[in-house]
């Protein structure tokens, strides 16, 4: 029984990581209707920056904040320099662009930080808590994830900038007509997505160890979570991310075994696409004409 | 000495279009400070295109000045920030957002303290918006969405209000209500209105000046009262 409970708690902890990455995917999807397949590689790159700063003797949380800030700027830069000029290009151009971005960031990561697997420190108490029910890192990283998700929610719900970003994503033409600088809102969206991805990377690295392909599986789970909850619904994607985390852990432990765990993500992706393409919480726009 | 008051909006030789060809063939018109200027014409004449051209939503050539300042070729966001509000064709509702959020977006560029008071004023002009304040805007009726579009535009506190067929698809009673509100806004607020209408009769009642557009050219212009009285114009262009 205790083992089962532990699997659920561990599932929630990794689910938080998937939820964060799923949220980052949904934010860009809502604004551009493209899935940023490079989200994982960007997060890995960010995590290496954090490790570099920590190894240079920076206090962990200072390195954390600096990395999030740098990642935000890199996200903005990628949108301004790479995505902006492709604004009106056809879908396949975008797919090509994203694949290119995946390869470039991934190779850049390997080239700059080398390909060996590196341990990554946890800032939390490193050991079991509550009689082995949960580890200090699981508890801490879940708390960080929840705080981040809460802040993102408050930002979009209760600030003018958040409202302007949502308006730009939903209806760019009307947004321009009220004076919103739509182009910059997209860039900010990329920045935020990159920052959230960086936090997810830093939180998961102590568990999975750091190497250039660290986020590959995680991106797949996050994508499954986003689809499960509804690729156009941020709240749904977050719930979907947590759900996939729990399903993955339970399924991996009791049904398919750890080796086939990743298949579960594919099963979820294909299942959702077949049964309910809009996801469990897919936004149904009520409209009368 | 008489001082010449320059028009708020002055358009000269305006060409505009969506692809390689121009829809507007180089038109001239002006909107005087204060009051309503009507732009009339049949379906497909280029009325919507003209409004889009004024706020930089499509490709243009020629001269457009707002209170003497050239705005041709500038970004829509910048033109809007100079005080040009647009009630667009199709109403431009942010369907997924609430009525409140739609209204907040109207005032999103403003930094002054008057926004709360302007919200109250909108509730006075459009009591239904107050009732529907927390509702998703996509659930509003057509008439309510038109009111929301006007409220959103007025919350910018514009100098120039561009209105694209506010009567379109609405029941006569609602149309009357909306035109009544337009007259109130003109009288009580310092805003000039460029009104695009297919319903010429209605528009000429409220307008001071009018222009008649036919396939991208202005074919008639003058005081609205004169055009209303001119039977030959009415017969040949306005069809009533
Ligand atoms: N988005 C568009 N893309 C291409 N052509 C358009 C578009 N909108 C309007 N047009 C063309 O421009 C011409 C004028 O249309 P429009 O300005 O909408 O007329 P009106 O508003 O007077 O009914 C029409 O021939 C129409 O087909
Ligand atoms: Mg039109």
Image (tube, coloured by chain):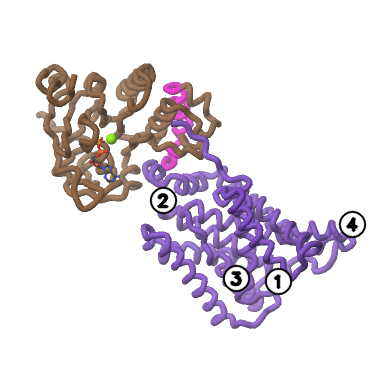
Chain colours: A purple, B brown
Q: Are marks 4 and 3 in contact (CB under 8 Å)?
A: no
Q: Quadrant of residue B67?
A: top left
Of the residues tagged 4 and 2, which is closer to the observer? Answer: 4
Q: Which residue is mark 3?
A: A44
Query: Quick check: do tags 3 and 2 share a chain?
Result: yes
Of the residues tagged 2 and 1, which is closer to the observer? Answer: 1
The answer to whether residue A62 of the structure is visible from this angle is: no
- The residue shown at (78%, 59%) is A250
Numbered badge on residue B122 = none
Q: Are marks 1 and 4 in contact (CB under 8 Å)?
A: no
Quarter of the image that includes the C terminus of chain B:
top left
Q: Which residue is mark 1?
A: A208
**Chain on which label 3 sits:** A
- Along the horizontal axis of the image, is B128 left or right of A273? left
Q: Which residue is mark 2?
A: A182
Quarter of the image that includes the N terminus of chain B:
top left
Badge 3 density bin: few <14, some 14–19, many ≥20, Cα 10 Å: many
Q: Going from the N terminus, do you reach mark 4 or mark 3 first?
A: 4
Query: Quick check: do tags 4 and 3 share a chain?
Result: yes
Cα distance between the residues tagged 3 and 2: 28 Å
**Residue range highlighted in magenta:** B104-126
The response on whether ligand 1 sits within 8 Å of label 3 is no
Q: Going from the N terminus, do you reach mark 4 or mark 2 first?
A: 4
**Chain on which label 4 sits:** A
**Chain on which label 2 sits:** A
């Amino acid at each position: 029984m205790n083992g089962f409970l532990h699997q659920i708690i561990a599932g929630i902890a990794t689910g938080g990581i998937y939820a964060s990455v799923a949220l980052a995917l949904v934010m860009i999807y809502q604004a551009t209707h493209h899935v940023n397949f490079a989200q994982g590689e960007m997060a890995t790159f960010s995590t290496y920056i954090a490790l570099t700063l920590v190894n240079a003797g920076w206090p962990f949380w200072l390195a954390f904040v600096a990395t999030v800030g740098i990642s935000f700027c890199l996200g903005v830069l990628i949108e301004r320099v790479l995505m902006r000029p492709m604004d009106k290009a056809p879908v396949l151009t975008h797919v090509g662009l994203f694949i290119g971005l995946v390869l470039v960031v991934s190779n850049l990561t390997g080239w700059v930080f080398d390909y060996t697997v590196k341990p990554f420190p946890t800032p939390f108490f490193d050991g079991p808590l509550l009689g082995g029910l949960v580890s200090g890192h699981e508890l801490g990283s879940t708390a960080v994830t929840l705080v981040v998700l809460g802040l993102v929610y408050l930002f979009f719900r209760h600030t003018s900038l958040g409202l302007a970003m949502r308006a730009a994503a939903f209806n760019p033409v009307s947004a321009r007509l009220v004076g919103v600088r739509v182009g910059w809102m997209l860039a900010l969206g990329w920045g935020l997505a990159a920052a959230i991805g960086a936090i997810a990377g830093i939180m998961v690295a102590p568990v999975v160890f750091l190497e250039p392909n660290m986020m590959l599986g995680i991106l797949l789970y996050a994508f499954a979570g986003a689809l499960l909850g509804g690729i156009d619904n941020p709240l749904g994607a977050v719930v979907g991310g947590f759900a996939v985390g729990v399903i993955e852990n339970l399924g991996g432990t009791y049904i398919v075994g750890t080796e086939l765990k990743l298949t579960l993500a594919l099963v979820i992706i294909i299942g959702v696409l077949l049964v309910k393409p809009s996801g469990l919480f897919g936004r149904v726009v009520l409209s009368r004409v | 000495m008489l001082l010449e008051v320059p028009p708020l909006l002055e358009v000269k030789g305006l060409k505009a279009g969506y692809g390689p060809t121009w829809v507007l063939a180089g038109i001239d018109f002006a909107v005087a400070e204060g009051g309503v200027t009507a732009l009339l014409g049949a379906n497909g004449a280029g009325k919507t295109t003209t409004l889009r051209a004024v706020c930089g939503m499509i490709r243009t050539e020629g001269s457009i000045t707002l209170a003497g300042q050239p705005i041709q070729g500038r970004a829509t966001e910048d033109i809007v920030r100079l005080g040009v509000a647009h009630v667009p064709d199709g109403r431009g509702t942010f369907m997924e957002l609430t009525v409140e959020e739609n209204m907040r977006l109207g005032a999103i560029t403003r930094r002054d303290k008057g926004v709360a008071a302007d919200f109250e004023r909108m509730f006075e002009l459009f009591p239904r918006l107050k009732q529907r304040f927390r509702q998703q805007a996509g659930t509003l009726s057509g008439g309510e969405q038109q009111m929301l579009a006007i409220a959103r535009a007025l919350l910018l506190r514009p100098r120039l209000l561009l209105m694209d067929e506010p009567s379109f698809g609405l029941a006569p009673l609602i149309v009357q209500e909306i035109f009544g509100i337009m007259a109130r806004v003109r009288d009580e607020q310092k805003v000039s209105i460029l009104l695009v209408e297919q319903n010429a009769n209605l528009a000429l009642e409220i307008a001071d000046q009018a222009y008649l557009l036919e396939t991208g050219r202005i074919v008639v212009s003058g005081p609205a009262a004169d055009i209303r009285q001119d039977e030959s114009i009415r017969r040949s262009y306005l069809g009533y």
